[in-house]
Image (spheres, rainbow, N blue to C red):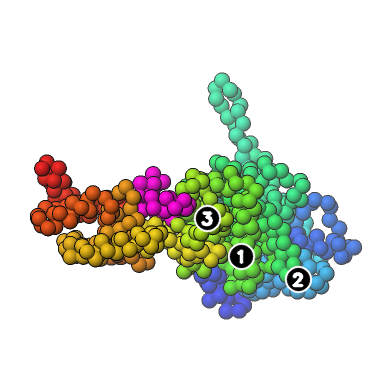
Amino acid sequence: MAKKEFKSESKRLLDLMINSIYTNKDIFLRELISNASDALDKLSYRSLTDKKVKIKKNSLKINLSFDKDARTITISDNGCGMTKEELEDNLGTIAKSGSLAFKENMTKQEKIDIIGQFGVGFYSAFMVADKITVTSKSIDSEEAYTWESTGADGYTIKKSQKATSGTDIVLNIKTDTEEFEYSKYLDEYELKSLIKKYSDYISFPIEMEVTHHELKDEKKHEYEDHKELETINSMVPIWKKNKKDVKDEDYENFYMDKFNDYDKPIKIISSSVEGMISYKLLLFIPSHTPYDYYNKDYEKGLSLYTSGVMIMEKCSELLPDYFSFVKGVVDSEDLSLNISREILQESHNLKLIAKNIESKIRKELENMLKDDRETYESFFKTFGVQLKYGIYNNYGQDKEKLQNLIMFYSSKKQKLITLKEYVDNMAKEQDIIYYAVGSSIEKINSLPQVEQVKDKDYDILYLTDYVDEFAITAIQEYDKHKFANVESENLDLESDEEKKTTKKANEDNSEMLKAMATEIKDVSEVRFSNKLKSHPVCLTSQGDVSIEMQKVFDAMPNDLGIKAQTILEINEKHPIAEKLKKLYKKDKDEFLKYTKILYSEAKMIAGLPIDNPTEISQLICEVISK
């Protein structure tokens, strides 16, 4: 029998199909099952429009079997089948799709779901098979034909025998190589896993013989195996079922099974959207961070389905980074797929779905904050850092979306509050939102600068996560109220009389203060201050980079050289102020020792490392031993 050449520049195009278009060998089974599903859909449609075509109820199905010894996989369907001409057209001409032609010939009112549109999915099987044999009998013909090919060198078609209409595809699986183990596709568990992963919601049953191990003799611990035909796929996805027929427990079990979590989700979001673009949504907010969430290999994204077929396991385009913890599925038939059905073309519809998903998640979180505070606080303690990261990322362009969702510890309420709650409870004369930064609530409470703000009876937001101050800086102001770090130099909380007194003290002792700044070198200025109550000294910052920001930059693996511009402030009312004045006049050496000790004390309070701890320790011992 003469071998026929493929049409459409077959060798080059088929090589492209196998080696370039498809990047994941596993999807060959998805493609062949999708084609079988199309054939069943076509027959089902014909039975509704052609009185001559009759099918028994629930008789349409797909069967999958394998033979390890023969190294074959067989996919069979009892659908519409193909004539010799259709085999020639559909399989002999690469990139011609019978499914697409069938769909185009239907009226708008008759449209049904047809998965295959490009006519290339069948050829993905050549990624794993060195020979493919297709035997098909059309519903419109008494004769069956077999199409066979070993790849780009061509194909043969011959008359054959087949009792019923439908198509059988036999793949001769390639031998293993050093690069790839093709034998894995001849394993029962692997085939079942691929069906569940990619084709679980094909609307026709996918049957396969599976092995069961049964106890034969309990005393002897003997087992025997027997095979049983089982339907592998679920067919109807949980998100397509009527909500009234699905319990929360069903959603929870689906989540834990599909996303390999041992805990129930903290929130379930189910939605069905109809309109210019239609889709179904089933989302889950986990109760804890995934084990690999902060790993660089973590992949965000939602599982994307169309017509029961999983197109992408993790479609990252559907979630913004700040909601990367959300798990779930999106099912839509209104998306533009590329030729391999593996990735999406640049799509307006995809962007629209993503925008709606972001809005839906945000609204659900806002409702949770409003109606279920305890649950929201539990969520926020787990994923709040991600929301705050989303505020300052991309130059703060998403701050308006997220600023009402973030929370900080309140010095007054002694619990987490929102920015809105802070503003709603501000004192009448207060115009600034005050915050303090530190690694813990206890450490912030001990900051000298906190005293002055508390004395005014103003609330302070405690920022304890490394990202907090960056988020606040990105927000800039909330409800027309600016933010101020209590460690900043310009809090402006002193009275006019206090300012006058402090100004005079700094002018009268300007030479002494300059001498201290010269000795320290790391600070831009040393000055007396009225902001301190019981503490002798503190460090305040100037400019955009705070002391806590500097700590974050210092902790980065590459030294960015970003430092806070600091001021050493001395409590003008503390006895140490008079001690310094006396030493500066009588004992300059002792004065410089005190200067170094006080600066080191201020650095320790601020949580900054001391460059020369041995020297400072010796100086302290000298001073206290006198």
Identify the residue at horizontal 80%, vertical 50% (top origin): 58
Mark 3–mark 2 CB contact (< 8 Å)? no
Give the side of residue 84 with respect to residue 172, left or right.
Answer: right
Numbered disc in front, either 2 or 1: 1
Residue 512 coordinates in the image, percent (x, y): 17, 62
Image quadrant where residue 402 sits: bottom right
Instruction: Return the residue nearer the eye: 527 or 386.
Output: 527
Q: Amino acid at mark 3?
A: Ala
Give the side of residue 236 with respect to residue 508, left or right.
Answer: right
- In the rendered image, the residue lying farthest to the top is 219
Residue 458 is one of the magenta-drawn residues: yes
Which residue lies under the disc numbered 3? 427
The numbered dot on residue 274 is: none
Instruction: Return the residue nearer the eye: 134 or 560.
Output: 560
Residue 211 coordinates in the image, percent (x, y): 61, 40
- In the rendered image, the residue lying farthest to the right is 51
CA–CA distance between discs 1 and 3? 41 Å
Mark with earlier residue (2, 1): 2
Find the magenta span and give its range.
435-461
